[in-house]
Image (cartoon, helix red, strand yellow):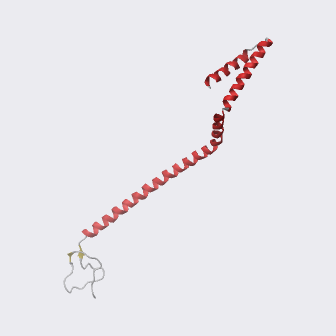
Amino acid sequence: MPVAARVQGYLVALPIADDQVVHEGDVLAQVEQDDYRAQVDQARAQLAAAEAQVASLTAQQAQLSAQIGQARTQQAATVRTSPELRRQQQLISTNVGLRRARRAHRRAGAAVGRRQADGGAAGPARAGLRAGAALRLDA
């Protein structure tokens, strides 16, 4: 029966003698293991690096998913507040708020004048006048 090697390498030992009868499973030759061990170690290191990369990418995916959730929450809040923001910007650009405050101030002043002319108590109206004056100073 012909004998053929399935691996390449340097022989370390030949535990059989010439013309010795061998049986299935007997060791015919021992090949140096250093090259194979180095290849196995290298493959294990590559496997460990790939597993570490998978773990890192999994962690990044979880972090990005959390960031996407936060961004969606912020977007929803922005959508809810956008109409109010546009309304306020429009009020500022047209000075509607200032006009309303000035009208309220004039009304309060007119009310004070009427009460004084009527001889009534003008305490609450004066408070309104003071509040209106404060609005004028702030504007």
The x, y position of residue 34, in whole percent, is 24, 68
Asked whether 8 or 116 is in front, the reply is 116
Closest to the observer, 51 or 75: 75
Whole-percent x, y for residue 1 in the image: 28, 88
Task: Tell me the quarter of the picture where residue 103 sits.
Answer: top right
Q: Residue shown at 21%/81% (left/top)? A: 16
- Is residue 137 left or right of 15 when viewed as pictured? right
Residue 67 locus on image (x, y percent): 51, 49
Q: Quadrant of residue 4?
A: bottom left
Identity of the residue furthest to the right in this view: 118
Q: Looking at the image, which residue is at 64% across and 43% down?
A: 80
Residue at 24% in and 78% down: 29
Residue farthest to the left, as pictured: 18
Asked whether, in this view, residue 9 is left or right of residue 61, the answer is: left
Query: Furthest-front residue in view?
Result: 94
Looking at the picture, does residue 90 appear above or below residue 126? below
Q: Is residue 18 above or below residue 121?
A: below
Residue 43 position, x and y percent, is: 34, 65
Quarter of the image with the C terminus in it? top right
Q: Nearer the viewer, residue 89 or 25?
A: 89
The number of callouts visible is 0
Q: Residue furthest top?
A: 119
Q: Residue at the spot x=48%, y=54% of the render?
A: 61
Q: Quadrant of residue 19?
A: bottom left
